[in-house]
Amino acid sequence: MSVGDAPRREIESVGAWMLDRAMSMNGVTGADVLYYFSRSHTLSLRDGEPEENASGVSGGIGLRCLGKDGRQGVAFGNNLSRTALVDVIEWSHANCMNSEPEEGIFLYSGSLDDDAARLEISDAEIMSGIGTDWRMRECLAMTAEAKGLDERVVSVRAASWGDGYAKSFYASTSGISGWRAETSASCGVAVVMNSGDSFEMGSSGNSARYLSDLDGLYHARTSVNKTRTLMGGKPLATGKYTVAFEPEIAAMIVGEVGELFCSSDIHKGRSLMKGKLGKSVASGAVSLVDDGRMSRGMGSSPFDGEGVPTGKTVLIEAGTAVNYLYNLQYASKDGVNSTGNASRSIGSLPDVGTSNLLLLPGQESRESMIRGISNGFLVSELMGLHTLDPISGDFSLGAKGVRISGGVPGEPVAGVTIAGNLLDLLMKVTAVGSDVTFFRSIGAPTIVVEGVSVAGGSAF
């Protein structure tokens, strides 16, 4: 019998049985169970013609067994038959017994908060079901909007819509259990524009918990405006510039910075933030928080993968690193409390991850900041950020945008490389704007950085 969208009472009963059975296994001192089910729908058009129209479900149930010497093992399946569940239990037990002992492995025994309603992460409109006809109308409207904005649009390469919901259940032998339900929707538009010998492709899109927080026509307009701004781009002369990063690009950088505060990577020596607590890691303009309880946040949840309540953690305060993110294991190693940042799937052991990251805004408007740049570069595309070295912080990234001269955005820029070090970049942030925009689970405003090395070609 497939896991499917089973009734709550059935999953709770199955979970309790699995936990009882696991505790009867030799050497098991504790166990927890995680159930997950999701249903999703995707529709995508290419130049107004259907390219993808898919619906899917996924689900499963996983069990983690804990041993008295810090061993742990996990196994999962997608079948609720008694035979299949016994296999999961036996494999979890075997994986536990054959694992290496570790410090800090235990179950949370506090109160579990499963009141997700206060976080507004489940939209009744999405839960009630959105039909294919509705998705088709949205995609056709985005296509028509993009095509009608500029005659140089030669292709609406993609107009897409997706939506779905998910639910999960957590329970452990420490006596806690709880449910979480969530929804999401996403839309995006990608266009190709042509002017003479110049072709440029650009896109815009986002995700949200609620339908009312998405505007497909906005992303159609943004994709066209962004693309035509970049058409015919030429390299800047190699040198140092004052660089302004658009909110979307700033959010990409913030995502990389946030990951460096995960305590699992700190302990494994895979983060340049190791040993940096209490030290200056950015300019005083930079303050960064991780907030797992943000209303309608794409990364929000009432509890984490270990049943620990989520919370708000300040990572950087006015340039100083002040906290790391923790699950139970690494919090125990450092003698602190978990921050509720355990990240986990039904088939994995708990790790540490971010929830909603936010670079706190400043007071200055984007327009005012740009007016203050005499010789600069406004970056609207950044390629290769995933290649950033998390240990050294060194990076070399392709970039596109527009030239800023005398406080005025001007000619399009392409074919340039921004190189440097992440800590050095953070130290050189001179202004943080007031225009915070969220891109999925990361929010950031426009930021301005002085003295950034840009490698290009000849001057305009």
Image (cartoon, helix red, strand yellow):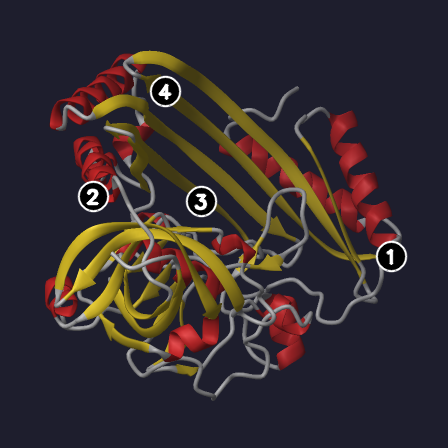
Question: Which badge, 1 or 2, comes first in the chain's sequence?
Answer: 1
Residue type, label 1: Gly
Q: CA distance from mark 1 to mark 2?
A: 64 Å
Between disc 4 and disc 1, the foreground one is 4
Q: CA distance from mark 4 to mark 1?
A: 49 Å
Of 107 and 385, the residue lying toward us: 385
Between disc 3 and disc 2, the foreground one is 2
Left or right of residue 309: residue 296:
left
Of 443 and 158, the residue lying toward us: 158
Question: Which badge, 3 or 4, comes first in the chain's sequence?
Answer: 4
Question: Which badge, 3 or 2, comes first in the chain's sequence?
Answer: 3
Residue, x 51% and y 63% (percent of image)?
395
**Which label sits on residue 43?**
4
Question: Which badge, 4 or 1, comes first in the chain's sequence?
Answer: 1
Between disc 3 and disc 1, the foreground one is 3
**Which label sits on residue 229?**
2
Please name the residue that numbered disc 3 is placed on. 180
Q: CA distance from mark 2 to mark 4?
A: 28 Å
Left or right of residue 423: residue 17:
right
Answer with the quarter of the image where residue 44 lies: top left
Please name the residue that numbered disc 1 is placed on. 27
Tell whether label 2 touches label 1 (CB within 8 Å). Answer: no
Q: Residues within 10 Å of mark 2 (few under 14, many from 20)?
A: some
Between disc 3 and disc 4, the foreground one is 4
Left or right of residue 132: residue 97:
right
Q: CA distance from mark 3 to mark 1?
A: 31 Å
